[in-house]
Amino acid sequence: MPNSITAIKTHSAPLPVGPYNQAILADKWLYCSGQIALNPNTGEMVGNGDIEEETKQVLKNLLAVLTEAGANPQNIVKTTIFLTDLKNFNKVNQLYAEIFKDGISPARACVEVSGLPKGGKVEIDCVAWLG
Protein backbone atom coordinates (compact mmCIF):
# COMPACT_ATOMS: atom_id res chain seq x y z
CA MET A 1 0.00 0.00 0.00
CA PRO A 2 1.39 3.43 -0.94
CA ASN A 3 2.30 5.81 1.87
CA SER A 4 0.41 8.66 0.23
CA ILE A 5 -2.40 8.85 -2.28
CA THR A 6 -3.48 12.19 -3.74
CA ALA A 7 -6.20 12.99 -6.27
CA ILE A 8 -5.04 15.29 -9.06
CA LYS A 9 -7.57 17.82 -10.33
CA THR A 10 -7.22 20.63 -12.87
CA HIS A 11 -9.74 22.80 -14.67
CA SER A 12 -7.39 22.77 -17.67
CA ALA A 13 -8.66 19.28 -18.50
CA PRO A 14 -12.23 17.95 -18.53
CA LEU A 15 -13.60 17.23 -15.10
CA PRO A 16 -14.61 13.60 -14.47
CA VAL A 17 -18.16 12.67 -15.41
CA GLY A 18 -18.28 9.77 -12.98
CA PRO A 19 -16.80 8.42 -9.74
CA TYR A 20 -13.13 8.73 -10.73
CA ASN A 21 -10.34 11.33 -10.74
CA GLN A 22 -8.34 12.83 -13.57
CA ALA A 23 -5.31 11.19 -11.99
CA ILE A 24 -4.09 9.62 -8.77
CA LEU A 25 -0.61 10.20 -7.40
CA ALA A 26 0.40 7.18 -5.31
CA ASP A 27 3.76 7.94 -3.74
CA LYS A 28 5.77 8.76 -6.88
CA TRP A 29 3.55 6.92 -9.40
CA LEU A 30 0.98 8.96 -11.34
CA TYR A 31 -1.95 7.07 -12.84
CA CYS A 32 -3.80 9.26 -15.35
CA SER A 33 -7.34 8.39 -16.34
CA GLY A 34 -8.11 8.15 -20.02
CA GLN A 35 -8.74 11.43 -21.78
CA ILE A 36 -11.08 11.95 -24.71
CA ALA A 37 -11.43 15.04 -26.89
CA LEU A 38 -13.58 17.10 -24.55
CA ASN A 39 -13.07 20.84 -24.37
CA PRO A 40 -12.51 21.47 -20.64
CA ASN A 41 -14.36 24.82 -20.79
CA THR A 42 -17.50 23.72 -22.61
CA GLY A 43 -17.63 19.97 -21.97
CA GLU A 44 -18.27 19.49 -25.69
CA MET A 45 -16.37 17.16 -28.00
CA VAL A 46 -13.74 18.78 -30.21
CA GLY A 47 -13.05 17.98 -33.84
CA ASN A 48 -16.43 17.05 -35.32
CA GLY A 49 -15.19 13.49 -35.88
CA ASP A 50 -11.78 14.53 -37.27
CA ILE A 51 -9.30 12.06 -35.74
CA GLU A 52 -6.40 14.49 -35.86
CA GLU A 53 -8.31 17.28 -34.10
CA GLU A 54 -9.57 14.80 -31.50
CA THR A 55 -6.06 13.47 -30.91
CA LYS A 56 -4.66 16.98 -30.44
CA GLN A 57 -7.31 17.71 -27.79
CA VAL A 58 -6.78 14.36 -26.07
CA LEU A 59 -3.05 15.02 -25.80
CA LYS A 60 -3.66 18.59 -24.62
CA ASN A 61 -5.97 17.27 -21.88
CA LEU A 62 -3.51 14.58 -20.83
CA LEU A 63 -0.64 17.07 -20.69
CA ALA A 64 -2.75 19.42 -18.54
CA VAL A 65 -3.26 16.64 -15.98
CA LEU A 66 0.44 15.79 -16.04
CA THR A 67 1.37 19.44 -15.54
CA GLU A 68 -0.98 19.76 -12.57
CA ALA A 69 0.82 16.80 -10.97
CA GLY A 70 4.25 18.34 -11.63
CA ALA A 71 5.07 15.96 -14.46
CA ASN A 72 5.85 16.22 -18.17
CA PRO A 73 5.92 13.78 -21.09
CA GLN A 74 9.40 12.57 -20.13
CA ASN A 75 7.91 11.19 -16.88
CA ILE A 76 5.50 8.90 -18.75
CA VAL A 77 6.49 5.23 -18.65
CA LYS A 78 3.36 3.61 -20.14
CA THR A 79 0.41 4.69 -22.27
CA THR A 80 -2.63 2.98 -23.67
CA ILE A 81 -4.32 4.27 -26.80
CA PHE A 82 -7.89 3.23 -27.50
CA LEU A 83 -9.12 3.70 -31.09
CA THR A 84 -12.53 2.99 -32.52
CA ASP A 85 -10.86 2.30 -35.88
CA LEU A 86 -7.28 1.06 -36.23
CA LYS A 87 -7.21 2.62 -39.70
CA ASN A 88 -6.57 5.88 -37.80
CA PHE A 89 -3.42 4.47 -36.20
CA ASN A 90 -0.91 6.31 -38.43
CA LYS A 91 -2.58 9.72 -37.98
CA VAL A 92 -2.74 9.30 -34.21
CA ASN A 93 0.80 7.92 -34.09
CA GLN A 94 2.24 10.97 -35.87
CA LEU A 95 0.70 13.40 -33.36
CA TYR A 96 1.55 11.15 -30.42
CA ALA A 97 5.20 10.96 -31.52
CA GLU A 98 5.50 14.77 -31.37
CA ILE A 99 4.89 14.67 -27.61
CA PHE A 100 7.88 12.37 -27.05
CA LYS A 101 10.33 13.76 -29.63
CA ASP A 102 12.68 15.10 -26.91
CA GLY A 103 12.99 11.97 -24.80
CA ILE A 104 12.42 8.28 -24.50
CA SER A 105 9.07 7.13 -25.81
CA PRO A 106 7.10 5.19 -23.19
CA ALA A 107 5.94 1.61 -23.42
CA ARG A 108 2.56 1.50 -25.12
CA ALA A 109 -0.44 -0.56 -26.05
CA CYS A 110 -2.91 0.41 -28.75
CA VAL A 111 -6.21 -1.39 -29.05
CA GLU A 112 -9.31 -1.07 -31.16
CA VAL A 113 -12.52 -0.75 -29.17
CA SER A 114 -16.15 -0.85 -30.21
CA GLY A 115 -16.96 2.54 -28.71
CA LEU A 116 -15.74 5.39 -26.51
CA PRO A 117 -17.58 7.92 -24.32
CA LYS A 118 -19.34 10.80 -26.12
CA GLY A 119 -18.76 9.09 -29.47
CA GLY A 120 -15.03 9.81 -29.36
CA LYS A 121 -12.64 8.14 -31.78
CA VAL A 122 -9.56 8.14 -29.51
CA GLU A 123 -8.79 7.91 -25.80
CA ILE A 124 -5.36 7.87 -24.16
CA ASP A 125 -4.34 7.11 -20.58
CA CYS A 126 -0.91 6.89 -19.00
CA VAL A 127 1.25 6.01 -16.04
CA ALA A 128 4.13 8.30 -15.07
CA TRP A 129 7.00 8.12 -12.58
CA LEU A 130 7.75 11.30 -10.64
CA GLY A 131 10.78 9.99 -8.78
Image (spheres, helix red, strand yellow):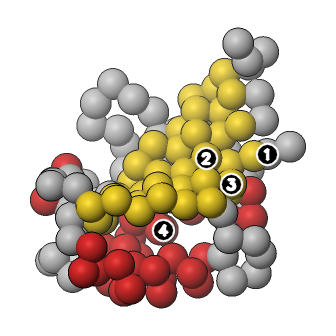
Instruction: Name the residue: 76% across, 28% down.
Output: 27
Real-space CA distance between mark 1 and mark 3, rounded to the nearest whole angstrom: 10 Å
Residue labelled with disc 1: 130
Residue at mark 1 to residue at mark 4: CA–CA distance: 19 Å
Earlier in the chain: of badge 1 and badge 3, it is 3
Q: What number is the disc on residue 60?
A: 4
User: What separation in Å lies between label 2 and label 3 (alpha carbons)?
Assistant: 6 Å
Tag 2: Cα neighbours inside 10 Å, few (<14), some, or many (≥20)? many
Pick whichever of labels 4 and 3 is earlier in the sequence. 4
* Label 2 close to label 3 by CB (< 8 Å): yes
Query: Given the image, on which type of amino acid does mark 4 rest?
Result: Lys
Residue type pointed to by label 2: Val
Q: Where is residue 6 in the image (x, y as percent from the top left)?
A: 64, 26
Percent from the top left, x then y, of residue 17?
A: 27, 37
Amino acid carrying label 1: it is Leu
| Residue 127 image position (x, y, % from top left) | 61, 47
Query: Is residue 64 at least partly visible in the picture?
Result: no
Instruction: Bin the neighbour count of mark 4 within 10 Å (Cα to Cα): few under 14, some 14-19, many 20 and up.
Output: some
- Alpha carbon distance from label 4 to label 2: 16 Å
Q: Are marks 4 and 2 in contact (CB under 8 Å)?
A: no
Q: Name the residue under label 2.
A: 127
